[in-house]
Image (cartoon, rainbow, N blue to C red):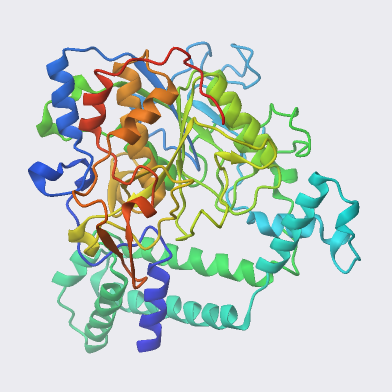
Amino acid sequence: MNRILLVLFFICIHLISFGQAISPSQNWHWKDYTQDNVHGISLFQAYQKLASFSKKPTSIIVAVMDGGVDTNNIEIKPVLWVNKKEIVGNGIDDDRNGYVDDIHGWNFLGGKDGRNIDKAADEKSRVYHKFKNRYEGKQIDESKMNPAEKKQYENWKQAANEIEFSDDDAANLRYISMATNAVQKLGNTIIKELLDSNFSLEQLKSFQPIGRNTLEAKMAYLRTVKMLGIEPETPYLEIIKDLKDYVEGKEKSATAKTKPPTAIRADIIKDDYEDLADRFYGNNDITGPNARHGTHVAGLVASIPETTWNVKSLYPNITIMGVRVVPDGDEYDKDVALGIKYAVDNGAKIINMSFGKSFSPEQIWVDNAIRYAASKDVLIIHAAGNEYYDLETKAVYPNPYSSYLNDTTNNIITVAASSEEFINNSLLTDFSNFGPSIVDVLSPGNKIYSTLPGENNHGYLQGTSMAAPIVSHIAAMIRSYYPNLSAIDVKKIIMQSVWKPSNPNAEFVVPQKEESKKLTEIASAGGIVNAANAIQIANKYIPSKNIKSKTK
């Protein structure tokens, strides 16, 4: 059992839906350091300032490019963007934008027959097998390659190296599979007496078993989940699903080199992937088969207020446009590029992108789309990623820097995840990517509470995916109340307004890593975003003369 527990602990630090042992208060990320001694974003104080300024909000569209947004959630539904140029359900492209019945956005992972891509291969597998016959076992003379061919070959070599499944990987997979089976076996024993197939930890704690086997299963289960640090609200079936999904992903990695990815895109979407001009594919199902991640992100963008605040009248007029481009697996560059263009062309002024990957074979498409957004004064908020990579040395895409265009765009804010001391005894997390030449700011990203799929469901997730939409809400506040400010202005304000430690050389422990870092080693602004400070600066900020975002 000890080995199983250790393996499960290994899992928990890789699955962002699992948390620490201490349950944080809901919405700690909204709190204020001076008033609450919590390193939140001072959201209530920001709205108090807006009230004192006697300003009125204007409408602002935020595109959530993600894995899907649940349109039936009662808190998300009222803030969904509505394309008023379309007539619901008539099967006609009324606004002639190429996308039929795009009422709340568009799903680039859907087929005309209503089917959806759910799970997709990682990009390294797609890259490796796409060029395997061209490069594997061949004598390659790089001196005869043009820059594009050389880049392609370098990508393939990296994919070929990373696709290897080592003996250690195989051993870990066996142990993890065994651990998953053990947790499920314990749960099944408990269910025979508890008579609830989806029990929570809190429910189990108060349960008094009759049989000795059930009592032993209960105690073993509680010890296991304590090691995992799973939230008391997390139901049994969700725990099992997360574990099985993790195992399934590792099993795919084990066979990735010998088994090419299935042609799921050709079967469902039926586009010519190599042709960016073939862009009118997909369907209008922005929810898709798994909207957990995207619904959580959308709730953070909207930042549904506490009823005790009495400030809802002050909330910016945010509407959320759903753009589904992220499957369970790596997104396709074509979908990302066209998703950005769709969002821009349909009025989004902020795009939240809580996704990323280590390979981007069609990077130039995405780079050009980002710069198109810049030319239209659209701000992109991008999650830095959860691999604890130093982005000074390891590239993650999308990226503000384009190796093809040899420039860096200024309309992206890259966001790392901060934590709080009552969660893990530090302001830092052990998962967030970092690097001040790429990462701009920190934002709360550990144990964040928000909406989940279902009519009225909520829960905790963690990751830079949660940190980014918190920044998107601040950006939406500024752009709603101060519409004359450009995307570049808003980025500057957010970076200038961060909370910083009084001692700039203060170091904070990186949990699990046996090291400490200054905030300036994580992000160039060297601090955590603060809505109240941002509104204070925005109220006096002189708009730049050229509202277009630029590259450098």
Residue 517: x, y in percent?
A: 33, 61
Q: Is residue 24 above or below residue 138?
A: above
Side (left or right) of 381 relative to 20: right
In the picture, the quarter occupied by the N terminus is bottom left
Residue 453 shows in the view: no
Q: Quadrant of residue 254?
A: bottom right
Q: Quadrant of the C terminus?
A: top right
Report the number of numbered marks: 0
Residue at (55%, 25%) from the top-left corner?
373
Observer-nearest of 251 and 343: 343
User: Is residue 340 visible to us here?
Assistant: yes
Query: Is 92 or 477 nearer to us in this picture?
Result: 477
Q: In the displayed structure, would residue 419 be above or below residue 377?
A: below
Whether residue 345 is situated above or below residue 227 in the rendered picture:
above
Q: Position of residue 342 (x, y in %)?
A: 58, 25
Q: Position of residue 290 (x, y in %)?
A: 48, 47
Residue in the picture at 85% in, 61% down = 135
Q: Nearer the viewer, residue 49 or 322?
A: 49
Pinpoint residue 507: horizontal percent, then vertical percent: 27, 60
Q: Nearer the viewer, residue 96 or 350?
A: 350
Q: Residue at x 51, y 54 (%)?
A: 391
